[in-house]
Image: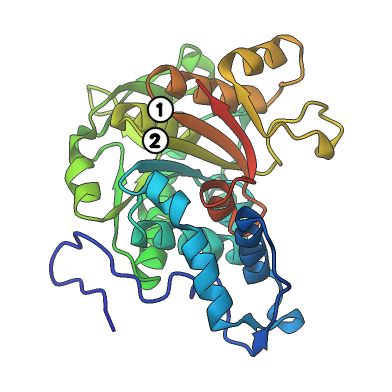
């Protein structure tokens, strides 16, 4: 039986049981046959995330069948770079955090090249509260004075980033924690209204050279969304923006934004009106018509910008759904809205 060793850079992962992270140990369960193989793949993922108390494990034959039917998706994305922005409820729920980590490890094991970008708003707020520093927001952006910037850097780089690295390592892959400072990965500049927001920045330049050897050797980079300007001043940057700019600079196959919504809705009041797929022209019209508004606008804008710079597809998916990354990448069903060029 093959094993993963960490004595040398992991040029590739060997996979003893790709569905093991998804399927708990419990007695067998028989499923009725399904003619549509994509439907069977969806059923396997859904079965894997249901409660252990309410189901038994699929039979070995069924597991093998499902694995074989994932082959077209593995072939499509094998060797391709996928940039995932991690945030929202998936960061605060232990179950959802474990789901994201196991998805990333599985995707790396079958040959994808995932890169994880994260913020950490809830953790920042908690530490600010402990230090009796009020959290202030304007137009959805955190007002970041010098003291707050220091806390942001400590929490994102020192706590959130290293926690994610540890979880990925414990799950069987090998992660490397970075921020925009490292290797001049990101160079920041102040946002236009910095007089009101303080040290809130945007991405002025991306130098992905520090990432290329890491992904080439099978590591999973985990990147905190802070960076410095040319003079060395640190800035807090929106994690969606960082993910989009990194995806563009790396020529990624796919950008995925984990959010706390189902995706883009045709009718904001109707969750059932989810738009599964749309092109840039269509989503721009939805913005003009007011169907995309509020906090969804910067996410959509980030996707449009990355697509315009060469990213193949960008998806806004429901991070509240367990194993949403696998649903998005390894099935035709998806887990939100995919925007195409």
Residue situated furthest front in the rendering: 35
- Whether residue 158 is visible to the viewer of this picture, yes or no, is yes
Point out residue 262 in the picture as x, y percentages from the top left corner: 71, 41
Closer to the camera in the image, 139 or 290? 290
Q: Residue at x 64, y 58 (%)?
A: 42
Point out residue 254 in the picture as x, y percentages from the top left corner: 44, 36
Q: Where 100 falls versus 52 (above or below)?
A: above
Residue situated furthest left in the rendering: 8
Q: Where 194 falls versus 99 (above or below)?
A: above
Q: Quadrant of residue 28?
A: bottom right
Point out residue 10 in the picture as x, y percentages from the top left corner: 20, 63
* Coloring basis for residues: rainbow
Classify mark 2: helix, strand or loop: loop
Q: Quadrant of residue 300?
A: top right
Other residues around mark 2 within 10 Å, as few (<14) / some (14–19) / many (≥20): many
Task: Write down the residue under mark 2.
Answer: 253
Other residues around mark 1 within 10 Å, as few (<14) / some (14–19) / many (≥20): many
Question: Is 212 displayed left or right of 286 in the figure?
Answer: left
| Contact (Cβ within 8 Å) of mark 2 with mark 1 | yes
Residue 73's tag is: none
Q: Quadrant of residue 111?
A: bottom left
Q: CA distance from mark 2 to mark 1?
A: 6 Å
Q: Residue at x 29, y 69 (%)?
A: 14
């Amino acid at each position: 039986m093959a094993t993963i060793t960490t004595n040398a850079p992991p040029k590739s992962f060997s996979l003893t049981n790709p569905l093991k992270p998804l399927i708990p140990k419990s007695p067998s369960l028989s499923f009725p046959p399904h003619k549509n193989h994509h439907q069977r793949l969806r059923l396997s993922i859904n079965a894997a995330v249901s409660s252990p108390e309410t189901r038994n494990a699929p039979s070995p034959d069924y597991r093998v069948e499902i694995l074989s039917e994932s082959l077209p998706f593995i072939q499509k994305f094998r060797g391709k770079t996928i940039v995932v922005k991690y945030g929202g409820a998936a960061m605060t729920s232990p179950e959802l955090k474990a789901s994201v980590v196991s998805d990333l490890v599985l995707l790396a094991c079958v040959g994808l090249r995932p890169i994880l970008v994260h913020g950490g708003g809830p953790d920042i707020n908690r530490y600010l509260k402990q230090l009796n520093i009020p959290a202030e927001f304007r137009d959805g952006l955190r007002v970041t004075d010098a003291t707050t910037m220091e806390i942001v850097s400590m929490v994102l780089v020192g706590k959130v980033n290293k926690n994610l690295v540890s979880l990925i390592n414990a799950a069987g892959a090998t992660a490397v924690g970075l921020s925009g400072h490292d290797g001049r990965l990101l160079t920041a500049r102040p946002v236009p209204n910095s007089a009101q927001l303080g040290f809130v920045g945007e991405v002025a330049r991306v130098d992905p050279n520090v990432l290329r050897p890491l992904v080439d050797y099978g590591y999973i980079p985990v990147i905190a969304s802070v960076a410095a300007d040319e003079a060395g001043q640190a800035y807090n940057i929106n994690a969606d923006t960082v993910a989009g700019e990194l995806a563009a600079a790396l020529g990624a196959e796919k950008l995925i934004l984990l959010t706390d919504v189902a995706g883009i809705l045709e009718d904001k009041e109707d969750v059932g009106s989810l738009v599964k797929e749309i092109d840039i022209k269509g989503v721009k019209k939805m913005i003009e018509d007011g169907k995309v508004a509020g906090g969804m606008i910067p996410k959509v804008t980030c996707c449009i910008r990355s697509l315009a710079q060469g990213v193949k597809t960008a998806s806004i998916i429901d991070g509240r759904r367990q194993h949403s990354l696998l649903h998005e990448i390894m099935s035709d069903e998806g887990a939100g809205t995919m925007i195409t060029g």
